[in-house]
Amino acid sequence: MYETEGVSSQDAILPYMNFPKFPNYHVAVLWIYLLVLLSVVTQIPHVLVYEPSISPPALFITGATLLCLFFFVLFFRKGKDYPIHGEAPFIFCAIAYAFAFAIPEEILFRGITQGLVLSSFTPILSILLSSFIFGLAHILNSTKGVGPMNWNWQLVGVSFLGGIPLGTLFLLTGSLFLPTILHAVFLLVFQIFLSN
C-alpha cells in the first residue's frame, strides 16, 4: 500500500468503512487454492458437481449440524464480553471470505479427497479420513510458532468434527452444493460471532 504521512491509501480512500484486514496467511492460501484448482479442475472436471440435490436425510443432517453450531456458539460466547461483529462492511467481507474458502475447500476435500478415498475404503471410513485430512489442513492457521506445541490443534479438532457432516452430506447427495453452503455458514458464524 502507498503510505502518506502514516495513512495507508486504503484508509485515505475509505476512511469511514471498517473493512477487516485478513492475515497474509489467508491470502497465500487462497492463491494456492486458485493454482491447485485451476490445474486439477481442468484434469478432472467431474468433481464440480453443484446440482442442488436435497433429500430428507440430507436436510436432517444439515438441521442437526446447524443446531449443534448454534449451541457451540452459545457455549463459547457464554460469559464473553466482546460484541458481535455486525457492521455492514464487515458482514459483506465475512460473506465473501466464507465463500472464498468454502468453495475451493469443498472441491479439494470433498470432491477430490473424499472421492479418491471412497474408491478404496468404506463410506464411513472415507468420511472420517477425508475429515481428518481436512482438519490437518487447518493446522497452521493462526499458529503462534514453528513447533507442534504452537500449532492450532483446537482448529484441527473443530475442522475434523465439522468435516464429518460435510462429508456425509456429500456422500448422501453426490453434490457439493449443500456441503459448500454449510461450510460457508460455519465460516460466517465463526467470523461474526467468534472472531476476537
Image (tube, rainbow, N blue to C red):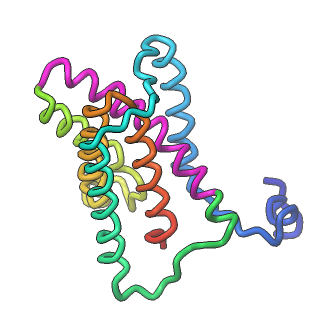
Instruction: Determine the residue positioned at 15% across, 19% down.
Output: 120
Which percent across, then down, holds residue 152? 32, 58
Which percent across, then down, holds residue 155? 32, 57
Relative to residue 79, is residue 85 drawn left or right?
Answer: right
Instruction: Determine the residue positioned at 63% across, 57% down.
Output: 93
- In this view, 69 is above or below 26: below
- For residue 115: magenta? yes
Relative to residue 89, is residue 38 drawn left or right?
Answer: left
- For residue 30: magenta? no
Along the line of sight, which residue is nearer the eye, 178 or 110?
178
Instruction: Determine the residue positioned at 88% across, 69% down.
Output: 5
Along the line of sight, which residue is nearer the eye, 125 or 156?
125
Which percent across, then down, holds residue 185? 45, 54
What secondary structure prevails in the magenta region? helix
- In this view, 37 is above or below 177: above
Q: Which residues are magenta?
A: 93-121
- In this view, 119 is above or below 181: above
Instruction: Determine the residue positioned at 37% across, 50% down.
Output: 140
* Total numbered labels placed on residues in the image: 0
